[in-house]
Image: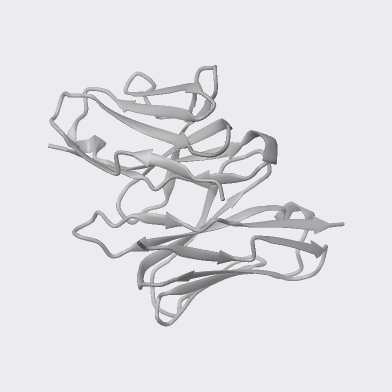
Amino acid sequence: GQQVMQIPQYQHVQEGEDFTTYCNSSTTLSNIQWYKQRPGGHPVFLIQLVKSGEVKKQKRLTFQFGEAKKNSSLHITATQTTDVGTYFCAGHYYGGGSQGNLIFGKGTKLSVKP
Amino acid sequence: GAVVSQHPSRVICKSGTSVKIECRSLDFQATTMFWYRQFPKQSLMLMATSNEGSKATYEQGVEKDKFLINHASLTLSTLTVTSAHPEDSSFYICSARIGDQGNTIYFGEGSWLTVV
């Protein structure tokens, strides 16, 4: 079946270092979404990428969607302790009609050492 | 690894009937489960947070009498859509938080509900 692989599973960084998490799909995605789950919270929507090769920025966060629409990355520049949490990607697959499923990656848990 | 199973994956029901969706944590105890709704190609919308043994906490705008959530055990939470209408047709997905692993959560596969 369709899968979204996300790596790494865990990432420990020193505050100020950069961080990147990657998602890969075996089949072409309709779009990809990114979510952040703060410790003790629930996943909160960050962004959706739709177009091939799309790059979007939110302050220190840069989101990319691959040209083939099979992979995506989230890059955080100069991490801060407020970036701590688990980052999930979720791929939306082309399906019959409008019923394509949203498949989540397993998430990358980021810890930031002050 | 941990698995969260949702059932059914797809269901079609008639207007006015009720339908139940189950969310099971297969190899861990989930103290908290979250229920989301997703409209086509949009982001997830949190509907409610379900804690084992207590009443669910619903997000603003979500009718608790319409979307009944029961978290009777540490491995099972159910969402019942009562008196379903076509506008309730959507993708519903649950996630479960592992009680003894801090903040790790896992998502179910989702359930497509079509109300005709």
Residue drawn 54% across and 17% down? B54
Q: Is residue B83 left or right of residue B76?
A: left
**Residue B12's spot in the image, x, y percent?**
17, 38
Identify which residue, A101 or B86, lies in the foreground: A101
Q: How many marks?
A: 0
Residue B90 coordinates in the image, percent (x, y): 28, 43
Percent coordinates x, y for residue B102 in the rendering: 70, 40
Q: Nearer the viewer, residue B101 or A45?
A: B101
Tell me which residue sits at (58%, 44%) in the image: B105
Q: Is residue B40 left or right of residue A97?
A: right
Quadrant (top left, top right, bottom left, bottom right) of the C terminus of chain A:
bottom right
Q: Residue at x 38, y 40 (%)?
A: B6
- Picture quadrant of residue A53: bottom left
Residue at 23% from the left image edge and 24% from the top image edge: B18
| Residue B68 figure quarter | top left
- Left or right of B110? Residue B76 is right
Above-or-below relation of B68 to B100: above
Q: Quadrant of the N terminus of chain A?
A: bottom left
Image vertical order of residue B39 relative to residue A4, above or below: above
Q: Residue furthest right?
A: A114
